[in-house]
Amino acid sequence: MGRQRPSSASARVLLVDPRAALRRSWARSLVAAGLDPHTLESLDALPALVHGRAPFVLFAPWAEVEPALARGGALTELLGRAQILALVEPADEMAATSARGRVFAVLERSDAPSPGLAVLVESAARAADAASVRAAGPPAIPDVVAACPTTAALMDRASGVASTPGPVLILGEAGAGKRLLASWLHAKSPRATRPLVVTALREPSSPAELELTLDEAREAAGGGTLVLDGVDALDSPRQGVLLEALRSRIGARVISTASPAVRDDERAGRFSTELFYALARHVLDVPPLRQRKGDIPVLVYQALRATLERLGLPPKRVSPDALRALRAEPWPGNVPELWARVERAAVSASHEVLTLGDFGLERKAAPPRRGGPPPAYAEARHSELVAFERAYVEDVLSHAGGNVTRASEIAGMDRANFRRLVKRARGRAEGREAKRQP
């Protein structure tokens, strides 16, 4: 699995209201949620903050938005591509009725925003991004690395699950790629053009707060996909709230993520059996990175390329020794740990070829022989050739991003011969690893 991109959507958040106290209160709530809101006194200042076709989310009093939509002109065009969260007075049911169906959501205009505000804004931002992507072309499918047989088998199974409407439970360690797989399932499903709403359940909250969060997330997802991230963090009362929410009508497809330990928790009675099976019509296990060694070279070059492009650094590549050592690391932090290690090496090194030292690794000395003569020439030569072919194949494939055709061109071989070389090199490696197993 590749590295999940940051979860926050790219749409800008704009807050319009003539009341300074309300602007400050709501802006503080949005900042606490990790957002960067811009505040304005009136809609008149909106064109100065919105440029090009960038998506944005707009909080504004419906009393200002409704006449602006009716007037026409540049402001109407801007409002037409915003995800509008209409603010109405608590007792103004007529305004709320008028706004419903024409905006993303209707909120009470008060000095104390609801606890689930961040979820709603994130959902609106994702919807704004999705609308922007649809205007530019078909929705993008997340880049999932499946270079090793273990991950390839997982993605084959995920392909069959993607088109089904039933709930999916994705299990895996932190950083293994659960949320990336959830995004991939959404992008490959018939719901791909509808909202993808991710709700993190690991933050402490009361049952009442969770109920509000789930209601807002369900409304935002509509007929799209609702991802419940970290269901195993819920205590018994909140498990009951989630189960009750699932029993009610949900138009969205539900995908949940959890640690593999949730299976033991269910057997031990710490996690509701009824909830477990309500979430787990289909179960997908994402293996940790240490069990997906074949993915590591491609992930290394994926991280390296992204870092160089983002920071505008000159091209770099990874030495075969360093790549081999990175494959051998245990990676308890999974993909984020690998990504951070590569990024540090790319930034700190001034030379083109990144070596063991750049990754904080040391060359492992060959184990001393236990007496006796050196091996025969043919045996020693064969051993070195096997090691060379394995390192060369992984280096070339990594440099080519896993593309066999491109790798064969780099190696100066035709595709069939290069595939035979890959099979021979990896077959020898797997054979040696099997012999080492107790």
Image (tube, rainbow, N blue to C red):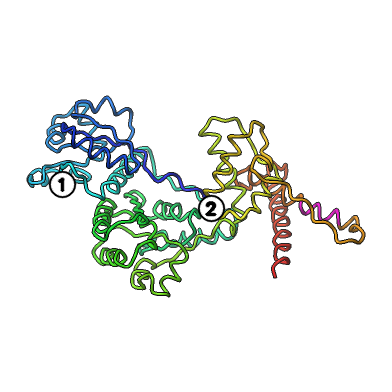
Kind of residue sitting beneath label 1: Arg
In what element is the residue under mark 2?
A: loop
Comparing 133 with 21, the one in front is 21
Q: Is residue 384 magenta?
A: yes
Residue 261 vertical placement versus 216 (above, below): below
Q: Is residue 205 magenta?
A: no
User: x%, y% of residue 339?
Assistant: 55, 45
Q: Which residue is mark 2?
A: 333
Comparing 300 with 238, the one in front is 238
Q: Is residue 75 left or right of residue 407?
A: left
User: x%, y% of residue 285?
Assistant: 49, 63
Q: Which residue is mark 1?
A: 100
Label 1 – label 2 distance at C-alpha: 45 Å
In what element is the residue under mark 1?
A: loop
Front tag of 1 and 2: 2
SS assignment for the magenta stretch, majority: helix
User: x%, y% of residue 321?
Assistant: 71, 46
Kind of residue sitting beneath label 2: Gly
Query: Which region shows up in magenta?
Result: 380-387
Instruction: Kindly indicate the quadrant of the structure image that contains residue 239.
Output: bottom left
